[in-house]
Amino acid sequence: MSDHDDNSLHEKPLEFLQSIGNTGGWCDGQAIIPSADGTHYDCWCSCGEWSVQAPTTEEGLHAARIHTGSVSA
């Protein structure tokens, strides 16, 4: 078994989303994607309780890290 087997970053997108759905946990996955009009990034979490807009991907990722508690505000 390789070191990558338990890392969600090495899963295909569908497998990753299925694993989020099957855990029933909170904050298992966050998304930062360009808005339809290209003016900002829409950011949300699988917990369903966090959704924001960010001007850049970096700010969206930082906001997601704050949301999950991996960095302080």
Image (cartoon, rainbow, N blue to C red):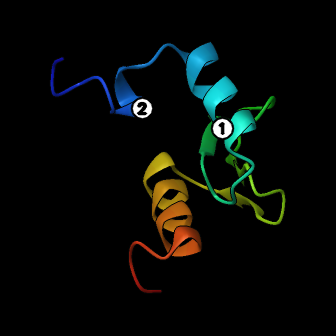
Instruction: Give the side of residue 15 with respect to residue 46, left or right.
Output: left
Residue at 44% over, 19% down: 11
14 w.r.t. 42: above or below: above
Give residue 72's position: percent from left, percent from top.
41, 85
Residue at 58% over, 17% down: 15
Furthest-front residue in view? 1
Residue highlighted by disc 2: 8
Instruction: Give the side of residue 67 with respect to residue 43, left or right.
Output: left
Instruction: Give the side of residue 47 with respect to residue 73, left or right.
Output: right
Give residue 39's position: percent from left, percent from top.
71, 42
Furthest-left residue in view? 2
46 w.r.t. 11: above or below: below
Determine which quarter of the picture holds residue 68.
Answer: bottom right
Residue at 63% over, 42% down: 31
Q: Nearer the viewer, residue 60 or 24?
A: 24
Furthest-bottom residue in view? 73
Give residue 30's position: percent from left, percent from top.
61, 48
Residue type at tag 1: Ile
The span from disc 1 to disc 2 (Cα, nearest Å) is 10 Å
Instruction: Give the structural element (helix, strand or loop) at label 2.
Output: helix
Residue highlighted by disc 1: 20
Instruction: Give the structural element (helix, strand or loop) at label 1.
Output: helix
* Placement of the N terminus among the 4 image quadrants: top left
Give residue 9's position: percent from left, percent from top.
37, 29
Residue at 48% over, 76% down: 69
Residue type at tag 2: Ser
